[in-house]
Each structure stands twice: as C-alpha cells, then as structure tokens.
Image: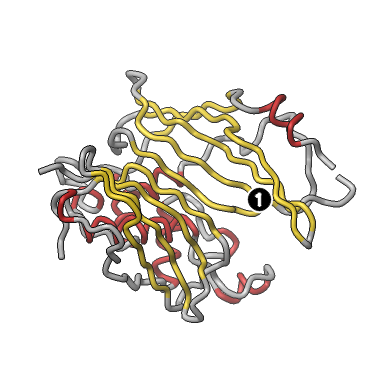
Amino acid sequence: MNINTVHDVEFGAELEPFQPDTSIDVTSAFADAVGWGDGGGRFTDHELARQQGLPGALVPGLLTLGFLTAMIHRWAPTGRVACVDTVFRTPLLADSQVEITAVVTDVDEDTGAVELDLSAKNAKDETGVFGTATVMLPLE
Amino acid sequence: MVDIEALKAQFLDLEFDVKAFEIDAQAVAAVGKVSGETRAEFTDVDHPDFQAPPAFIGSLASGRHLPIDFPNLGGIPMDGGKAVECHKPVRPGVPITGRTHLHDIYDKSGRSGRMVFIVTRMEIYDEAGEHLATSDSRMVIRERPDA
C-alpha cells in the first residue's frame, strides 16, 4: 500500500522489505560518486579488501543509509525524510544478500511526523546497520 | 584513562573547521541511483526539485575530523554511524558551507575495555546563511589501555 498522507499510516506496520543491489559495481560507483575513489579497494575489490584484513569488499555504511531512505521513499512517495540516524554495527559485504526492513513506531497525526525503526541484515540474519528515521507526511 | 568530562569541557561546541562545497549534479544523481531511489527528485538532474539525498549529504566531509589539539586516544578509529537531519533541500550547483564542531563525547565499557564515541557535527548553510542540513558522524575508538 502506498502511503500518501499521515492518516494512511498504521502504528506497528512493517514496510515492504527491500533487497538492494549490493554488487561491487554499485559499491564502487557509490565510492566514486562521493569522492572516495577506490579507497584502497575496501569498497571496490574483494581481494584488496582481504589484504587489509577485511572479510571482503564492504557495502559503505552511508550507502546502506541510502538504501534505507530509498525504501522509505518507495513506501511514502509524498514523504520527506526529516532525519535518519544509523549505527554501523557489523560490516555488510558487497555481492551479498542484504535485506532492508522498517517498522512504524510512532505516528503523530497532528504534525504528520512518523517514526520508523530501521535495520539492514545479512543472509545470516545479523544486523549490519540499524537506526531510526523521522518522516514528514502530508496531513491531507 | 582519558577523562571524558574534561574532553567535553575543552572541546564540545567549538567550531574547528569551515569548508566550502559545490555539489556536482551527476554525483548526486549517481548516489540516488545506486541507492535504489525511485523518486526523480533524487535521480534526475533535470527534475525541477532535484536535490541531494541524505546519503550524499552525509558524505560531505570536513577538512579535519577532530580539532587539531585533540589528544590521541590510541586504537584505530572506526566509523560507528551517521545521522542526517534535513531542514531544506541541498541542491547541486549552489555554493554551501559546512561548519563543524564536536557535538558529543561519551564512553561505553565492556569486557574488551572502554570504547570512546565522538560525534562530529557538520552544519550546512547556503550563501544566505540558511541552515539546510546537519550531518553527524559517530567515530568509535577502542581505547588503548595506556592512553
């Protein structure tokens, strides 16, 4: 269900889960676009990342924040993400399955503010990134 | 052990970096697209409301991560998280300025020792002085026992 106004939102509702593209082409393109270059390979090359002691090339935490806000925008095409706060707990790997989920934790029908709990998990159901967001939705 | 309260008293809320940015439209669109954005205002440079998504705003980096006289706490700093607060659209091609200070310092102790968390806050303004966005970076440092 698309959300158009704050009155469409139900407390406790879960957003449609989102499996983003975590391919190394995507993580490389993100690193390039934000000016990190190849970062010594940590986001662009599994072998170079392993040489740095990492388990493989990583999905940048900020890209995961981007996945989370993209999911919110899909859910609420008229909404505006006023605030998103993320904690990077465990590295998520490029070329691996990641599932992005969110649940509504508060709805203020007077102001249009909706609070969400967010998480990004890997295929082992380990949370790589979690956080919260405040989304402003139209009142009518 | 570093005295967190003394660090807070010495460093919090003191601006230590000012940096000018001019955002590239193609870079913004690229970030929107690889993030999986479906809304054109974050992916289409020709959209009338084209603007930077929060992930791009969070990528704007100050010239320094910490004040020049901040003590070395030892250990390897890790990226502990990001927060972005959007007040008004940040648009490509418009000169903006990031003003950075330390917003918070706190610690947590566990079996492996003490972790120090440092929150660096960049406030982003346009040329008219309008506050467009705030970006927080949370750095985590596992304290060296002899620090």
Amino acid type shown at disc 1: Val
Q: How many marks?
A: 1
The image shows residue A99, relative to residue B101, as above or below, that is below
Please name the residue shown 54% across and 58% down the image: A88
**Residue A105, position as x, y percentages in the image:** 35, 55
Q: For the residue labelled by badge 1, is the local secondary structure a helix, a strand or a loop?
A: strand
The image shows residue B141, relative to residue A98, as above or below, that is above
Residue, far bottom: A124
Please name the residue shown 35% across and 70% down the image: A20
Q: Tell me the residue that label 1 is attached to.
A: B140
Instruction: Name the side, left or right, on which A117 lies relative to B117.
Output: left
The image shows residue B14, relative to residue B133, as above or below, that is above
Residue, far top: B128
Q: Nearer the viewer, residue B49 or B9?
A: B9
Instruction: Name the side, left or right, on which B85 lies relative to B121.
Output: left
- Residue B107 falls in image quadrant: top right
